Image (cartoon, rainbow, N blue to C red):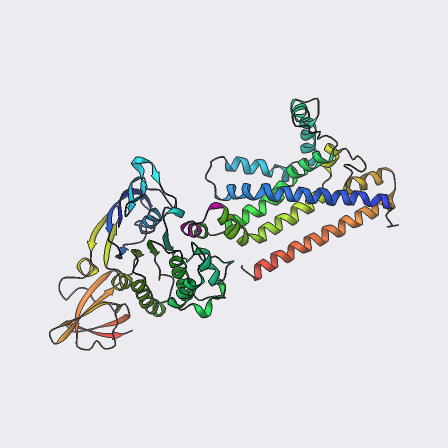
Amino acid sequence: MIALQAADIQPFWLTLKLATITTMVLIVLAIPLARWLAFGRSPLRPIVETLCNLPLVLPPTVLGFYLLVSFSPVSFTGRWLQDVLGLKLVFTFSGLVIGSVIFSLPFMLQPLVAAFRQLPSNLIDAARTLGKTEGTILTRVILPNARAGLLSGTVLAFAHTVGEFGVVLMLGGGVTGDTQVASIALYRKVEALDYAGAHSYALVLVSFAFVVLLLLRLIQSRHETRPC
Amino acid sequence: MLNLALTHTIPTPEGPRPLHVELALSPGERLALYGPSGVGKTTLLRLIAGLARPDQGRIAFGDTVWCDTGRRVHAPARERRVGYVFQDYALFPNMRVRDNLAFAQPTPNRNRLDELLALTRLAPLAERYPHQLSGGQRQRVALARALAQEPQLLLMDEPLSALDPALRVALREEIDEILHTVQLTTVIVSHDLGDVFRLAHRVAVLEPGKVAALGTPRDVLLPPTPGGRHALSGTVLAIEPADVLWRVTVAIGNDTVATLSADVDQLRIGAPVAVQLNGSSAVLQPA
């Protein structure tokens, strides 16, 4: 019942590829953004933070719908992306990556911002009086002392990307080999009344979710017992 | 050496209040900023370090202008080479003692680092993390780290306030010796008279809005004649011969009391003392 065909493995590889690329992009994006949100002084911060956290409460299909409309070649932005930058984002893997980055952003951002805000401000001031540049302070002081937040954010963003459905269906269209990730493949199996195949996908995804949550718990407990 | 004349708004329980300060320190001088909590002592240190900008005024060190609001000059903290010992020490939790010091060095210098570890008696603790140290040990690391950056000015914010009284006395003497060795121009914030008398050459007494008095601790803070209010416990500030007896000045709360004593062998400056009322005179015993 739970035997997967060779062709059925492909959505898992696509899912892992999407989650890995999305997580890497998010690490690069979220660290400076979290730093600005945690330590910046701009009055725009609450607005930006709220916008970044919208995917937490929005139905994924809403975000997927707006991205589909925005990236569609008939829209102004979609046409501009295609004509000027040569980017075709509807029903393509590149579009999936962009949608996933936007949708998983709060899962990376929230733990990072929380970890940054917990750091005593004197640590950063001390580094400044020691003559350190903001880049050195980030890499030598802030990130090492907020590593539990960084690890939690990375694991959560990766796991959340693996579990995406609404955005990838709307924006990716579930094209076999290109945008059909595991969650979509499971949906297609059910549509085709192939419950054995659906079970296989579901079991792997449940196992993955369990391992991820266990890993998160271990990270948190390690952080609690070893302050730094 | 350090010259500052500035006005800055200090948030107080009664609302924002401007603090006006004019100070000049000569090379190697140690100045204490003394006054009640909330008067703006720490804020003044942060302004000198470049961690905050004054509302108005000028701060210069030697020929270098660090801040001049009139000319829109503000050198960031990293360019001022100021050693700052924070009240909560602000040691980097992810670095061992040695790494905290090495991180502070402008250029890696193992010999200088070992010298500093020896000067501050931290060599046996060099491989420990900050959370594995006692309060007094962390304080010494904070001072050593501030010195490791080879500062031109040292700022210490309530360096001993987090320590228990016995440790405070011992560490105060250690810090005094270290500061004597390094001969750095130093500004020390404290609301403890023992710190002021033991560590500072001059004291600026801060009151809300202004510097109320400036001079040697003896001139500014000691009463002119023996007498004053007596309480039961205090801190020895000064011991000096007075004919066949000794004149001992003791801090009791925020007041100072000068009294005469025949036996001062067990009394030490900065140490706690019990003041026992006995008719018109007082008997002093180490607490």
Q: Is residue B184 above or below residue A136?
A: below
Observer-nearest of B278 and B80: B80
Q: Residue at x 47, y 45 (%)?
A: A134
Q: Quadrant of residue A175?
A: top right
Please identify the quadrant where the C terminus of chain A is shown: bottom right
The image shows residue A210 at horizontal and vertical percentages of 72, 53
Q: Quadrant of residue A34?
A: top right
The image shows residue B219 at horizontal and vertical percentages of 17, 59
Secondary structure mainly formed by the magenta segment: helix
Answer yes or no: is residue B153 visible: yes
Q: Is residue B259 above or below residue A28?
A: below
User: Left of A49 or right of it: where is A168?
Assistant: right
Residue B116 drawn in magenta:
no
Q: Residue at x 78, y 36 (%)?
A: A178
Q: Residue at x 47, y 41 (%)?
A: A40
The image shows residue B29 at horizontal and vertical percentages of 25, 57
Q: Residue furthest left?
A: B243
User: Left of B143 or right of it: where is B244?
Assistant: left
Q: Which residues are magenta?
A: A125-134
The image shows residue A187 at horizontal and vertical percentages of 80, 39
User: Left of A167 or right of it: where is A50?
Assistant: left
Q: Quadrant of residue B283?
A: bottom left
Query: Disc count in the image?
Result: 0
User: Left of B184 or right of it: where is B95?
Assistant: right
Answer yes or no: is residue A59 visible: no
